[in-house]
């Protein structure tokens, strides 16, 4: 089990839903592979998301996502996962960040 950290004061456990149980650090598979096995769909990386300019890996609350024409998505929950960071946003958007701020986003709704 991984530890989820609340990033936003209005975040509640409902934002995590079943997502919280998809990841097991004891499982050797990657986070997307675990999603594929534990979710009713698969990890679908979605193009077009940009990361805000003040983003820092060690400060998950700064990992805002922008999509052209939409309001920014702010981090609600974050969890360290091996050398990566899993961040959950509104609408089930979930991102996996590398320390160099490379990332993938998939909607797990």
Image (tube, helix red, strand yellow):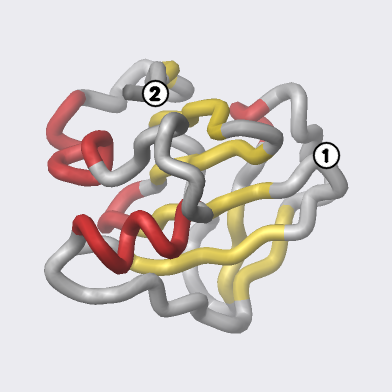
Q: Quadrant of the C terminus?
A: bottom left
SS category of the residue bearing label 2: loop
Asked whether disc 2 touches disc 1, contact meaning CB atoms under 8 Å apart, the reply is no
Q: Which residue is mark 2?
A: 2
Left or right: residue 93 compared with residue 13: right
Number of numbered discs = 2
Give the mark, 2 or 1, whose residue is nearer the N terminus.
2
Observer-nearest of 35 and 77 = 35
SS category of the residue bearing label 1: loop
How far apart are the two marked residues, 2 and 1, measured between alpha carbons? 26 Å
Left or right: residue 81 compared with residue 56: left
| Residue 31 point in image, percent of width and height | 47, 52
> Is label 2 or label 1 in front?
2
Observer-nearest of 64 and 19 = 19
Q: Residues within 10 Å of mark 2 (few under 14, many from 20)?
A: some
| Residue 21 point in image, percent of width and height | 22, 37
The residue at 48%/53% (across/down) is 29
The residue at 83%/39% (across/down) is 54
Above or below: residue 68 compared with residue 23: below
Observer-nearest of 65 and 28 = 28
The residue at 19%/61% (across/down) is 39
Residue 61: image quadrant is: top right
Observer-nearest of 26 and 67 = 26
Above or below: residue 87 compared with residue 50: above
Q: Which residue is mark 1?
A: 54
Q: Quadrant of the N terminus?
A: top left
The residue at 32%/59% (across/down) is 35
């Amino acid at each position: 089990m991984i530890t989820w950290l609340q990033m936003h004061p209005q975040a509640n456990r409902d934002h995590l839903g079943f997502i919280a149980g998809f990841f097991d650090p004891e499982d050797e598979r990657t986070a997307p592979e675990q999603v594929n096995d534990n979710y009713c769909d698969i990890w679908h990386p979605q193009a077009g998301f940009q990361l805000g300019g003040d983003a820092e890996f060690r400060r998950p609350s700064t990992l805002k996502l922008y999509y052209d024409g939409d309001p920014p998505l702010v981090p609600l929950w974050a969890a360290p996962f091996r050398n990566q960071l899993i961040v959950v946003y509104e609408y089930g958007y979930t991102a996996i960040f590398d320390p160099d701020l490379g990332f993938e986003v998939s909607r797990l709704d």
